[in-house]
Image (spheres, grey):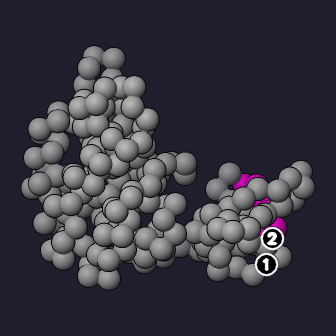
Amino acid sequence: MERILSRYIPDQAVAPVFELIKTFGVHLKVVDERTTRHGDYRRMPDGTHQITVNTNLNTYRFLITLIHEIAHLVAFKKFGRSIKPHGREWKHTFQQLMLPFIRPEIFPSKLLPLIARHFKNPKASSDTDALLSIALKEYDPDNDKYYIFEIPVGSVFRIYNGKIFKKGNKRIKRYECIEQKTQRVYLFQPNAEVELIS
């Protein structure tokens, strides 16, 4: 298991993550990319704990996602299943589990302040923290996608499911974009990744 982990997370994180996996009886599966989520935690009918993480994540995002999902498991064990999935019990658990990893031997120094800021009040997804998401993307392999905030107003773009939109104005934090087929308005996070058409 440690050899497998070393393919997906920074070397200095392998031993402590392996300890967490053993301690909490995690069955870890690395799965093909899912566009709607980076990872998932499930308590299986036989009582075992399965965590899935997408194979396409860079090592830093993979580590954050894995600890995020382990935090669900630990929070449910500690506080019961009636808690909110991303409520204060989960946030506190995620912070506690992540703290030992927020150090320069594991994360590049330019990511550390953004990670530290994010973990003061962690969100349901690191993607909703635009600054952290953009910084993490620098460690992804190159692709032909752009962030919404990078493209000019009026640009036409395609999203993962093939739908085509035209970028509109910014409304507080998110961008209003019009789906070309239905003319309905949707709000996009500034760091949503899209394929530019024109």
Q: Is residue 71 above or below residue 119?
A: above
Q: Is residue 166 magenta?
A: yes
Instruction: Report the number of discs.
Output: 2
Q: Is residue 124 magenta?
A: no
The residue lying toward the viewer, choosing from 16 and 84, is: 84
SS for dot 2: strand
Residue 152, horizontal then vertical, whole percent: 75, 81
Q: Is residue 117 above or below residue 95?
A: below
Q: For residue 151, which quarter of the picture?
A: bottom right
* Residue at image coords 72%, 55%: 162
Q: Which residues are magenta?
A: 162-168
Residue 87, horizontal then vertical, whole percent: 41, 42
- The tag earlier along the polypeptide, 1 or 2, is 1
Q: Main secondary structure of the magenta part?
A: strand
Q: Residues within 10 Å of mark 1 (few under 14, many from 20)?
A: some
The residue lying toward the viewer, choosing from 151 and 30, is: 151
Q: Is residue 122 above or below residue 130?
A: above
Look at mark 2 in the image and give the residue it sits on. Answer: 168
Q: Check whether the beta carbons of the residues at disc 1 and disc 2 lie within 8 A of each other.
A: yes
Look at mark 1 in the image and give the residue it sits on. Answer: 153
- Amino acid type of the residue that numbered disc 1 sits on in the rendered structure: Val
* Residue at image coords 49%, 48%: 37
* Residue at image coords 30%, 64%: 59
Q: CA distance from mark 1 to mark 2?
A: 5 Å
* Residue at image coords 64%, 56%: 160
